[in-house]
Amino acid sequence: MPLKQLNHYKVNLHILSPIHVGTGQELDPFSFVIRDNRLCLIDLVKWMDEYSEKEELHNMMNSDNFAHVRTFIAEKMDVKSSMLCSIPIDSKELHKTYRRAIEEKDPRNQVLISPMTRNEVTMDAFIPGSSIKGSIRTAIANQFVQKAGVTSKDSGRGRSDYNQKIFGRINEDPMRWLKLSDVSLRESGTVIVEAKEYSRNPDKALTPKGHVEVALSLCQAEKSVIHPLRLSMAPFMLHGEEVNPEFLLEALYQFYVSKYEEEYAKFFRTQRSAVIQQGISPMNKIVKEMKTNETLIRIGHFSHVECVTLDRVRNPMTRKGKDGKPLPWGTTRTLANGVYPFGWCKLEFLDLEAKTRPQRDWPFSSEKVDKIITRKPPQVPEVKKIIKPKVDEEDNFSVLVKQLNVIEANDKLGMERMVESINRIKDESQQKQFGKLIKKKLEDRGMWKKHPLRFEIEMYLEDN
């Protein structure tokens, strides 16, 4: 496949509701303490090296009593010298759970918290560009369900894959011509919330979801939360249509706006949801005023089945009930602190013309939104900037070079993150330089010629 020239576009990512893109693991209980309404990530090894009572420390750390060790660390930890960063907490339940765990030394009380993806050098949380790209991919795929002949049988074990029907074989996937930068959350930061299940049936027993770190949003902060996003792409043909920024915009709008409307009408329209209506009223106002260069998109965990599967062929597998039949799907939502739906954002394409969109019959009235938004919104603790990391702040290029130096060439996920990060570098000459560093690392291990990411890297090595 011949190489194409990528064009760069300016896009703003407006975070409307909390976003959680996790690592797939909970925080190690020895990796944090909670102080002054903030979760403090700590460098345990550094603290142990500096702790003066070595014999006391040695005896405690050799204990097989997990709960006692955790309490010892929580009570003795000097966060001023050993803190990597701190995250505000917006959950009274987390404070209660942590206090019980420390005071009662109960090993059953694990205090599980799912963190955001985080830069290990600067300790800044970020939204991976790959997560945003995955949401865009779903909307594009949805446009071609009928043209590609996709059916509900094209998913699941032992069945053909709808991805291949729509995008072709994996080594020819045209989505490689779309690149998105990671979004650093350094400026607005993150907050810890409780993920709560909300059901259409008020009598349903709800499933505990735990605590998660989320990107701060408009609904929580009471002000716009906007991040620049670097989108690079070369237009490509798919089933006889050109996929370009205009196509992306309309595919996203058609797919995600309908999901937003359906979710509101199905779950949040009744008087029972009055607190939710009030909490998300700033988001509703933004949604109904979107211009022709703006669209909704849903990112991250708790996006729900409707936003991660395709229309007309959606047939998710659910567990079986007592009668042996699959349980119905789409009957609950997961909400941050029981108020805010997860993952809703607005993409604003700054290079495209902004016009007023035709009026739409929204499930919430403009008058009701304006009325609710004037009330005092749910209170969220003040979100301070993350504490300055232990290393001096550097430009993206220098930070990425540091990360590349410590990653092994055979670390599949690590190298994939490095390749995705090339697009975070704004200077094209530095992009090319970083691509060469990755190539050399792989060549030194004899992995370059057959490496699955070779094509991705070569795009940055070519002269445009």
Image: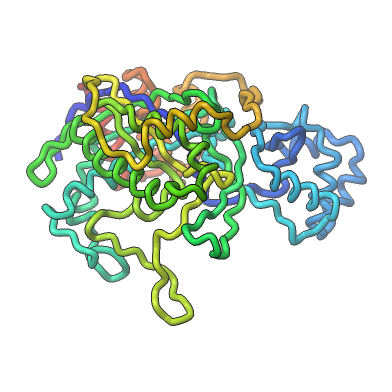
Q: Quadrant of residue 231?
A: top left
Q: Residue furthest left?
A: 240
Count all numbered tags in the image, as a single digit: 0
From the image, which quarter does the N terminus lie in? top left
Residue 405 appears in view: no
Q: Nearer the viewer, residue 166 or 248?
A: 248
Q: Quadrant of residue 324?
A: bottom left
Position in image of residue 120 (x %, y %): 57, 35
Q: Is residue 324 shown above or below 16?
A: below
Q: Nearer the viewer, residue 429 or 322?
A: 322
Q: Is residue 425 shown above or below 320?
A: above
Residue 320 appears in view: yes
Q: Nearer the viewer, residue 433 or 100?
A: 100
Q: Is residue 152 left or right of residue 440?
A: left
Q: Nearer the viewer, residue 44 or 182?
A: 182
Q: Is residue 213 shown above or below 219?
A: below
Q: Residue at x 57, y 61 (%)?
A: 207
Q: Is residue 433 left or right of residue 206?
A: left
Q: Residue at x 64, y 34 (%)?
A: 87
Type of colouring: rainbow
Q: Residue at x 19, y 46 (%)?
A: 143
Position in image of residue 94 (x %, y %): 70, 46
Q: Residue at x 62, y 32 (%)?
A: 380
Q: Is residue 247 left or right of residue 324?
A: left
From the image, which quarter does the C terminus lie in? top left
Position in image of residue 318 (x %, y %): 41, 68
Q: Is residue 460 shown above or below 140?
A: above
Q: Residue furthest bottom?
A: 323
Position in image of residue 352 (x %, y %): 23, 22
